Amino acid sequence: MKALLILLLAFLAVAGNVYAQQHASSFKVIPLGVKGGLDEGNLSAYMLAVEGTEQYVCLDAGTVYDGIQKAVDNGLFKQPAIAVLKNSIKGYLISHPHLDHVAGLIMNSPADTAKNIYGTTATINALQKHYFSWESWANFGDAGEKPMLKKYHYVTLGPQVSTALGNTGMSVKAFTLSHSTPYESTAFLINSSENYLLYLGDTGADTVEHSTNLNVLWQAVSPLIKAGQLKAIFIEVSFDNEQPEKLLFGHLTPRLLMSEMSRLAGLCAVENLQKVPVVITHVKPSERGDALIRQELQNENNLRLKLVFPKQAELLQF
Amino acid sequence: MKALLILLLAFLAVAGNVYAQQHASSFKVIPLGVKGGLDEGNLSAYMLAVEGTEQYVCLDAGTVYDGIQKAVDNGLFKQPAIAVLKNSIKGYLISHPHLDHVAGLIMNSPADTAKNIYGTTATINALQKHYFSWESWANFGDAGEKPMLKKYHYVTLGPQVSTALGNTGMSVKAFTLSHSTPYESTAFLINSSENYLLYLGDTGADTVEHSTNLNVLWQAVSPLIKAGQLKAIFIEVSFDNEQPEKLLFGHLTPRLLMSEMSRLAGLCAVENLQKVPVVITHVKPSERGDALIRQELQNENNLRLKLVFPKQAELLQF
């Protein structure tokens, strides 16, 4: 009986190990802010690193310090918040220049260390023109209005060109998104060895935006989904289904998200898409209540996707 | 004996009433954010109303929603945060266009109601050019880039001209401040019947800025201090005394504040200035610790001023 028990424990240990290896996470994400408006201390920003490393990039930067401080309070970092800001974030990827995606980067710049800011030409031009412009903030960049303090080096991302993310073991490809035509936003496809993670900035649906941008993106990532290499999709749902189409301002609703996911499932097969966690970002606080969006997403989840609702300063692993 | 007790109680009641009338507060202030950087959920913004009313102006607007939510949590408002934003704030006074003084206003604009934004020509121009500019945010103003959504009406404040603050029973005079020459900031002298409150945006010391702006302001308010009509001074101390002069960027230290207060005391007599609460704003979080600034202020308070250290969402009455 005792021998049987030992054998059983040994089997469980081996099986557990095999399971852990098969399901070892590739990326870790610490959301510094998850909301799409109003709450200044909780706006879009996601620290992303290869699992087992402490070299993060920050995907958008709406809220930085406040999120780091809460992550420190939650035990995710052992250093003080300012040290995490300085040492653990190696660069910023900015999807578009709306204030709720850049405010934390701008306002933390005096305390920050030298690092790269990655974005499309349009994003980097707007950062120089509107934020690091002396009238609104000291110019901590290495381009734009003089004098330039040159703490941040701008790295322009060409469309769908792979660019190394310095000191992180990751690289990125940028895809254009429509965010209330003619304004654009960006999706970042992050790569580390055989693993990928997709982060979309604000985006409207192709049908509403009269665009093919999401279709192009779905075509590009569907082979990765089929191959089991895409570990997560971060995508926005800003408004509930009651929001009139003409007041969407380049954003998605639960219905529009599910319609886009159906198109993606059509390219990669639904059983493959079901394995990819879909992380819902940028929910806008509203008088109808944030919970409504979550409810609508669950009601309309006929594809049985793995929906994830991120929380500020709570670790995600993919 | 019983008659004596009743007489004593009656005397105390009358005396208490007289004291309350003499010391009845004129203004109430709810700090929505008190810090001078980093912490995105706690940046300069102060709701101000005449005591007994609920018609506030917001002095600067670094953090708005997050501060209102905390004030609701503290029982200062009975309505939900969005309703307070919409109904209780009747206008915004912006001292200068640096992001940590306007981020809350910009980001809350989609949920806000129609109201006035008050500022100098330089401030209003920068709001139009850099924030409500479509590239960085939808234009909710009634001037600047087209299309204009016209939720906010800009009211330009001429130097030292009295301007009514609509629907609040208050008026304002603006005074120019130096904030790292050539950049300017503004002091607001708020008036309601015989009572005044002075709020300074970011400012350097006249000696460091090679300016006479603070001298002009002290000359203007010293008669009000002598007359007991100035109920409070809100003034910044961003850095501790160790900060090198060339890295002050148009801000004050405890030593520089006390030097300016000595000049003011010279104009109005120190015993009059001692009656005016001096509210310390815009302390920048630093690795040396925010407590250091407080300690230095207390150490250098030879004038024995009534220093007040505001806390987010905690009511002040003057």
Image (tube, coloured by chain):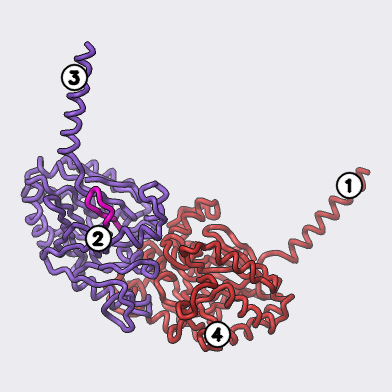
Chain colours: A red, B purple
The chain containing the residue under callout 1 comes to: A
**Numbered label attached to residue A206:** 4
Where residue A317 appears, as percent x and y from the top left, is 63, 63
Residue receiving disc 1: A5
Image: magenta residue range: B44-55
- Does label 2 lie on the same chain as label 3? yes
> Residue placed at 48% from the left, 58% from the top?
A68
CB-based contact (under 8 Å), mark 4 and mark 1: no
Secondary element under disc 3, as helix, strand or loop, is helix
Residue B242 in view in this figure: no
**Numbered label attached to residue B248:** 2
**Numbered label attached to residue B7:** 3
- CA distance for labels 3 and 2: 60 Å
Amino acid type of the residue tagged 2 in the rendering = Leu
Q: Is residue B88 magenta?
A: no
Where residue A152 appears, as percent x and y from the top left, is 40, 72
For disc 4, the neighbor class at 10 Å (few under 14, some 14 to 19, many from 20) is some
CB-based contact (under 8 Å), mark 1 and mark 3: no
CB-based contact (under 8 Å), mark 3 and mark 4: no
- Mark 4 or 1: in front is 4
> Residue placed at 57% from the left, 68% from the top?
A280
- Does label 1 lie on the same chain as label 4? yes
Amino acid type of the residue tagged 1 in the rendering = Leu
CB-based contact (under 8 Å), mark 3 and mark 2: no
For disc 1, the neighbor class at 10 Å (few under 14, some 14 to 19, many from 20) is few
Amino acid type of the residue tagged 3 in the rendering = Leu
